[in-house]
Amino acid sequence: MNVYDTRKMADVLAGLGYEPVETPEGADMMILNTCHIREKATDKVFSELGRLREHKIAKEKAGGKMIMAVAGCVAQAEGDFILKRAPDVDLVFGPGSYHELPEMILKAGGERVVNTDFPVEDKFDALPGQHKSQGPAAFLSVQEGCDKFCTFCVVPYTRGAEYSRPVQAVLDEAKMMVDGGTKEITLLGQNVNAYHGENDKGQTTSLGALIALLADINGLERIRYTTSHPKDMDEELIDAHGSIHKLMPYLHLPVQAGSDKVLKAMNRKHTAESYLDIISALRKVRPDIAMSSDFIVGFPGESEEDFEATMEVVRKVEYQSAYSFKYSARPGTPAANMAGLVREDIKAERLERLQKLINEQQLAFNRKTVGLTLPVLFERKGKNDGQLQARTPYNQSINVPANERLLGEIVGVKVTEAFGNSLAGEVVTEEMTLKSA
Ligand code: SAH
Ligand code: SF4
């Protein structure tokens, strides 16, 4: 979401004549776009600001001016406090108000500005269209905010109430992206499958129905969505995985924990069993679907037995990948006041066990694809010369020796080798088929 927001800020600023630069030295403006989800991310903000201010000081010494801004969820949560703690910051604005950057910049010429308003609806209306190419695989925000209030999470406070963009606005933006060369779109939202945008007739449209409409766009080849909540995996969306071939066989569906006691304390509104049932239903309509998840270990009150229930869910699902985190108490959330704190060393030890299992599963998944020929989308140049980086339908990253003219193309590639986090492969061409025949 922050990657998407950053691009959008660049689009807004392009209207004022700004353009992105590679390094902050000498820039007219720096924006630090921040994340508040865990303490570690928030802590980094002030150390990073300390580092960045050197560029502002240098520019001022040389007689220039540099606007220093803090954006994103830390800006939303900390507001004025950032101005107090970081005296060089001119501008603080949350994720709901970056479309107002032109006005804010004007004001910031004379005073320090804090903007933590939430006019989300206006934001999407006010943002400029995507005139520049977004690249072969790009994000498209369809939903923002969250009304779920999981007890550990700051998102409902920093991103505000749930909002779905109207269907036509999403379709228009998607078409513009495809015209610019985008082949794969990942629909974005904090709770993307809670999407319930209105169509032109004023009817509420679900994410499954929205995906069906997007699939009709010529030239759009691949659709993904993230992040979903188990509670909102309705039948229409599950069925879409079976019937819409442009919808990729990969789903990031966070479960957080495997113990129903912990899930209840987290206010997740689902059980381990209902989560596993969803995956069974998905695998019924799309047997090869690759699953991914988020996990939190060491939530207040988590016993060894509760943690073992998490491990059991992982063993049952066999993930393609997963992200796991130590529980981090966030100010203002209900869990921050819960009893039963789990010791740091126990959290670390559980995290290690979980990640070991996940890594094994990830490698096993990757190994299973060796020998297959998969359609991959070439997204960017690889780290090594003569190599391109692509993505398989299962969201695996694959490095392939290939000509740069294949960038942005979907090509058949045979998987030759599997590693923990990536694959290696080679382009399957007719020429090769002839040679080997
Ligand atoms: N909307 C998504 C998650 C958004 S936050 C969902 O409902 O699943 C992304 C991930 O950060 C979460 O899935 C969770 O695993 C992690 N996370 C959020 N708050 C956290 C906290 N306080 N401590 C540790 N991890 C956290
Ligand atoms: Fe946070 Fe996701 Fe829960 Fe919303 S559903 S509160 S974003 S973890």
Image: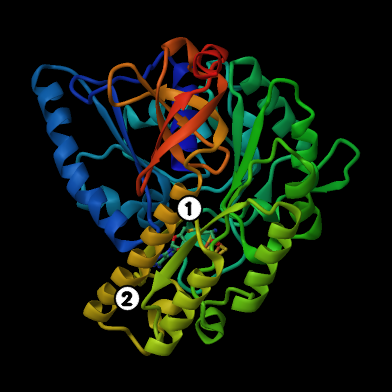
Q: Is residue 9 above or below residue 229?
A: above
Q: Seen from this angle, which residue lies furthest right? A: 201
Spot occupied by residue 323 in the image (x, y as percentages of width and height) = 41, 58
Would you name the residue on which mark 2 appears?
A: 350
Tag 1: amino acid = Phe
- The answer to whether residue 205 is seen in the rendering is yes
Report which residue position mark 1 lands on.
365
Disc 1 CB within 8 Å of nearest ligand 1 atom: no
Q: Residue 390 at what x, y percent from top left?
A: 46, 29
381 is higher (above) or lower (below) than 260: above
- Residue 250 against residue 137 in the figure, above or below: below
Q: CA distance from mark 2 to mark 1?
A: 23 Å
Q: Secondary structure at mark 1?
A: helix
Q: Where residue 315 sits in the image (x, y, percent)?
A: 49, 71
Give coordinates of residue 165: x percent, y percent.
70, 41
Residue 238 — which label? Answer: none
- Figure coloring: rainbow
350 vs 245, nearest the viewer? 245
Q: Is residue 380 left or right of residue 212?
A: left
| Amino acid at pointer 2 | Arg
Task: Mark 2 or mark 1: name the one nearer the start of the chain.
Answer: 2
Q: Residue at x 75, y 21 (%)?
A: 218
Q: Quadrant of residue 307?
A: bottom left
Which element type, helix, strand or loop, lies under badge 2? helix
